[in-house]
């Protein structure tokens, strides 16, 4: 039997309330969230009062488009500090876990050009995260021929990955499980990637986007225990995806402190 090693990862991105006030409208208000609420309440009241002037409508639109342009990537940071947990639904174009829920990134572990250095699991994790979340061109040599002498050279890094490597204290990877999948015959690594930096989410949260391997990307808060419990009970999971997801949640609950509020996760073996 031919066997390959697969990597399944649970990615957690840090999003904290304290960053929102640092990238907004400057000195217009000491509380930009409150300023936006006041503006929206005023606009709502004018709409409810009846048809307004075209000049007022243009002024309101300009205020939202220009005055709050920096709010987009930071919307999810309003509220208690938490982790943004990402889960994908696999597309119909992939051969593994098609149209099923899975953690992200998800991929196969294999060397690219450097058959010694690329054999590290960490190299695969970084590569898959770049390809599946940071918009880097797919360099998987199972899809096409490999022509780059050093496809993982620092000059080829995406901006988010370059920032992470320049700030190693904000980025950690852990293996949360290893085993043999009796359904697929693969050896599998379940891993957790944690980015403990509010600055990262402020800088790059708007650039995080799933690649062609996903038909949709979902975001969950690590403080929303109810939604996470319902997600774990979803029948759409791939078998290895659910295992990696629960292992990641279990570990995040141990290390995440006040940013995490999920039920205890127990495991066992049924005969």
Image (cartoon, grey):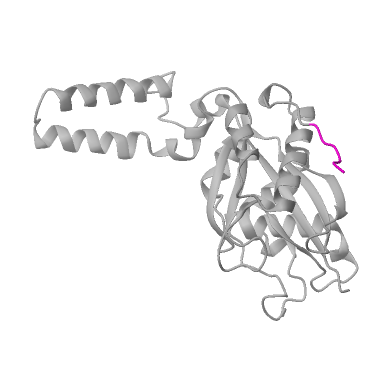
Whether residue 103 is visible here, answered yes or no, is no
For the residue pair 204 and 230, the one nearer the viewer reads as 230
Image quadrant where residue 205 sits = top right
Tell me what residue is drawn at x 70 percent, y 81 percent: 145
In which quadrant is the N terminus drawn?
Answer: bottom right
Picture layout, residue 101 above or below residue 68: below
Whether residue 245 is visible here, answered yes or no, is yes
In which quadrant is the C terminus drawn?
Answer: top right
Tell me what residue is drawn at x 65 percent, y 60 percent: 97
Picture layout, residue 207 above or below residue 151: above
Residue 66 sits inside the magenta stretch: no
Residue 80 x/y as whole percent: 57, 22
Tell me what residue is drawn at x 59 percent, y 51 percent: 88
Residue 203 x/y as whole percent: 56, 42
The part of the chain drawn in magenta is: 266-271
Q: Main secondary structure of the magenta part?
A: loop
């Amino acid at each position: 039997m031919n066997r390959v090693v697969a990597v399944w990862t649970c990615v957690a991105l840090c999003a904290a309330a304290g960053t929102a006030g640092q990238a907004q409208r400057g000195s217009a208000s000491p509380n930009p969230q409150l300023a936006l609420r006041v503006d929206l309440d005023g606009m709502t009241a004018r709409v409810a009062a009846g048809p307004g002037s075209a000049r007022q409508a243009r002024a309101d639109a300009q205020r939202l488009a220009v005055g709050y342009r920096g709010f987009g990537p930071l919307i999810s940071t309003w509220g208690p500090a938490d982790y943004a947990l990402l889960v994908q639904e696999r597309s119909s174009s992939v051969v593994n876990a098609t149209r099923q829920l899975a953690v992200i990134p998800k991929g196969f572990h294999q060397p690219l050009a450097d058959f010694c250095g690329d054999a590290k699991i960490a190299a695969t994790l970084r590569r898959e995260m770049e390809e599946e979340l940071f918009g880097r061109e797919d360099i998987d040599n199972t899809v096409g021929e490999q022509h780059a002498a050093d496809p993982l050279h620092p000059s080829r890094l995406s901006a988010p990955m370059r920032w992470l490597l320049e700030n190693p204290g904000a980025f950690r990877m852990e293996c949360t499980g290893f085993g043999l999948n009796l359904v697929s015959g693969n050896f599998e690594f379940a891993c957790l990637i944690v980015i403990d930096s509010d600055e990262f989410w402020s800088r790059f949260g708007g650039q995080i986007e799933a690649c062609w391997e996903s038909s949709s990307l979902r975001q969950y808060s690590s403080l929303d225990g109810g939604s996470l419990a319902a997600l774990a009970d979803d029948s759409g999971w791939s078998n290895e995806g659910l295992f990696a997801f629960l292992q990641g949640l279990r570990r995040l609950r141990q290390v995440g402190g006040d940013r995490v509020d999920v039920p205890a996760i127990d495991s066992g073996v049924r005969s």
